[in-house]
Image (tube, grey):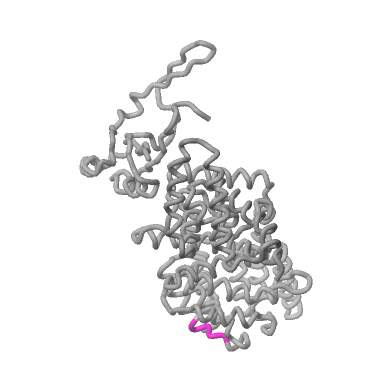
């Protein structure tokens, strides 16, 4: 590796740590960001001349810290106290890893809007540029810059603490952090793959920093098991390929193995969802899928997070395990409850079960209802294809 | 940090939400600096000056379902502490508590 490549590698590996430390030392997010940027620019010149330091992260932190000291020395008297505290804290920072956790928990504080949490996490923890984040969320760069500016101002002015939450707050705050990462992953899943990769990187970091948190492991497992199927999910034309028709040879074995190793068997939200994804990912053929187990896992999931969407998925699993009639009974009672009206997957699921029962007229009607509620182009094409199929079969049959 | 806590409740709904215990605890802990329950919005008056004319009207600043029914000034280490203190207030169980940091520093600056 030459000096430039080393700086690029260090940017990827060390930036969040260095930034987290500088925010902790200065309490000033903007100053910290500028000094970290400066440190990397200095590294480009100095590493080429003097060689790459043995501990690039420590070198960058020291350089950024000195830069911050310089800046504060030239500014007001008020900064004097801060300056002293920077010098004082110098000796304590042998272990950097916790610094990133402070950064993550602060970026995901519930007093920030969800949009702000997502943007700030991508900017500071994942190291994306403001322009990159704006592109990913189809937002003008100026709007995104404003969102980041406001988030940092709120942290400063509303007194949001820069720390890892104390034990009594940790569980709910960790749930909030995981929700931000999962939201990012879902954004990536629906068509922006680079965000899915960022989410997985963040998930890996959380597991590395909090190895005993089973839900952090569960979320990472869930993301890996879904991401393993990314190449098989769409065909050459960009159309969705249903799970049972996917070419399983194109699933990423490495990611699946990594995901399965993270499962702990605890009945918690992400662990259960990951366990379900693992049932699919480890079945060599669609027919060998353990639907009985999947239905049971959805049952457990419905107990801890009651939701009609979970019930709908349970109905699908029951249909696979015990036949479409049993599944249809569950779907019909869900439809009768009215909690999912307007949700396209309800009529789509119903249509599919009716089709398998040979009730093709009713299936066609339900597919039409689903089509009217669906906006995604790939899904709409899929539904139209099904409508054509059941209609032609009805005509052949009669 | 100093926060003002606005206690917002629907005044038309009768609730048994005596905050005496909360007030005593928070004053003992040096967190609550000052505070008061407010008279209902039927006793409220708004004042504006437009083109040099004083416009006075009956009623609150905005007609909303929940109205500010009380205020408290809190001295807390940070927002997390303020959130924990607010969550212990009996009105949190049915109303909404808003935490606003006081604008510290010079009285007027951008």
Above or below — where is A209 with respect to B74? below
> In the drawing, does residue A29 fall left or right of residue B64?
right
Q: Residue at x 44, y 27 (%)?
A: B107
Give the extent of the magenta segment.
A289-293
Residue at figure coordinates x 30%, y 28% from the top left: B39
Residue A115 visible in the shown view: yes
The answer to which quarter of the image holds residue A359 is bottom right
Q: In the image, is residue A374 part of the stretch drawn in magenta?
A: no
Residue depicted at 54% across the width and 48% down the height: A68
A62 to the left or right of B97: right
Q: Where does the N terminus of chain A fall, quadrant-wise?
A: bottom right
From this view, report whether residue A381 is shown above or below residue B89: below
Q: Is residue A292 magenta?
A: yes
User: In this view of the protein, which residue sits in the foreground, A102 or A49?
Assistant: A49
Secondary structure, magenta segment, majority class: helix
Return the x and y of residue A308 as percentages of the image width and height: 49, 65
Q: In screen coordinates, is A81 left or right of A223? A: left
Q: Is residue A54 left or right of residue B74?
A: right
In front: A257, or A315?
A257
């Amino acid at each position: 590796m030459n000096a430039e490549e080393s700086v690029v590698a260090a940017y990827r590996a060390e930036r969040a740590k260095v930034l987290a430390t500088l925010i902790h030392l200065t309490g000033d997010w903007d100053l910290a960001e500028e000094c970290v940027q400066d440190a990397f620019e200095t590294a480009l010149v100095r590493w080429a001349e003097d060689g790459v330091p043995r501990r690039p992260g420590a070198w960058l932190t020291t350089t950024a810290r000195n830069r911050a000291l310089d800046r504060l020395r030239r500014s007001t008297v008020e900064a004097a106290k801060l300056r002293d505290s920077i010098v004082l804290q110098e000796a304590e920072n042998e272990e950097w890893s916790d610094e990133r956790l402070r950064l993550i928990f602060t970026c995901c504080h519930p007093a920030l809007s969800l949009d702000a949490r997502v943007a700030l996490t991508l900017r500071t923890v994942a190291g994306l540029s403001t322009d990159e984040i704006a592109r990913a969320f189809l937002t003008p760069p100026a709007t995104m810059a404003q969102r980041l500016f406001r988030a940092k101002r709120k942290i400063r002015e509303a007194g949001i603490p820069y720390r890892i939450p104390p034990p009594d707050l940790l569980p709910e705050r960790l749930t909030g952090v995981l929700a931000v990462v999962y939201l990012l992953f879902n954004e990536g899943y629906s068509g922006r793959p680079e965000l899915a990769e960022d989410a997985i990187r963040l998930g890996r970091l959380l597991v590395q920093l909090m190895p005993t948190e089973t839900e952090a492991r569960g979320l990472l497992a869930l993301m890996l098991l879904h991401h393993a199927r990314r190449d098989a999910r769409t065909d050459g034309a960009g159309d969705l390929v249903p799970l049972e028709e996917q070419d399983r040879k194109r699933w990423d074995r490495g990611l699946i193995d990594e995901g399965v190793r993270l499962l702990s068997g605890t009945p918690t939200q992400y662990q259960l969802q990951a366990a379900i994804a693992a049932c699919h990912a480890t079945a060599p053929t669609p027919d060998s899928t353990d639907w009985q187990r999947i239905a049971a896992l959805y049952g457990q999931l419905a107990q801890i997070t009651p939701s009609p969407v979970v019930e709908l998925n349970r109905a699908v699993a029951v249909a696979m395990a015990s036949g479409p009639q049993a599944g249809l009974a569950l779907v019909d009672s869900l439809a009768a409850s009215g909690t999912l009206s307007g949700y396209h997957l309800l009529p789509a699921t119903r249509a599919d079960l009716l089709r398998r029962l040979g009730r093709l007229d009713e299936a066609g009607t339900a597919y039409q209802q689903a089509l009217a509620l669906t906006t995604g182009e790939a899904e709409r094409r899929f539904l139209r294809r099904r409508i054509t199929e059941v209609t032609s079969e009805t005509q052949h049959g009669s | 940090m100093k926060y003002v806590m606005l206690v917002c409740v629907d005044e038309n709904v009768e609730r048994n939400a005596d905050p005496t215990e909360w007030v005593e605890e928070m004053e003992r802990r040096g967190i609550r600096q000052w505070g008061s329950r407010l008279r209902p919005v039927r006793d409220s008056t708004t004042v504006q000056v437009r083109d040099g004319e004083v416009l006075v009207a009956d009623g609150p600043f905005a007609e909303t379902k929940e109205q500010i029914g009380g205020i408290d000034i809190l001295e807390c280490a940070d927002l997390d502490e303020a959130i924990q203190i607010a969550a212990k207030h009996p009105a949190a169980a049915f109303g909404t508590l808003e935490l606003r940091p006081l604008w510290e520093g010079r009285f007027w600056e951008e």
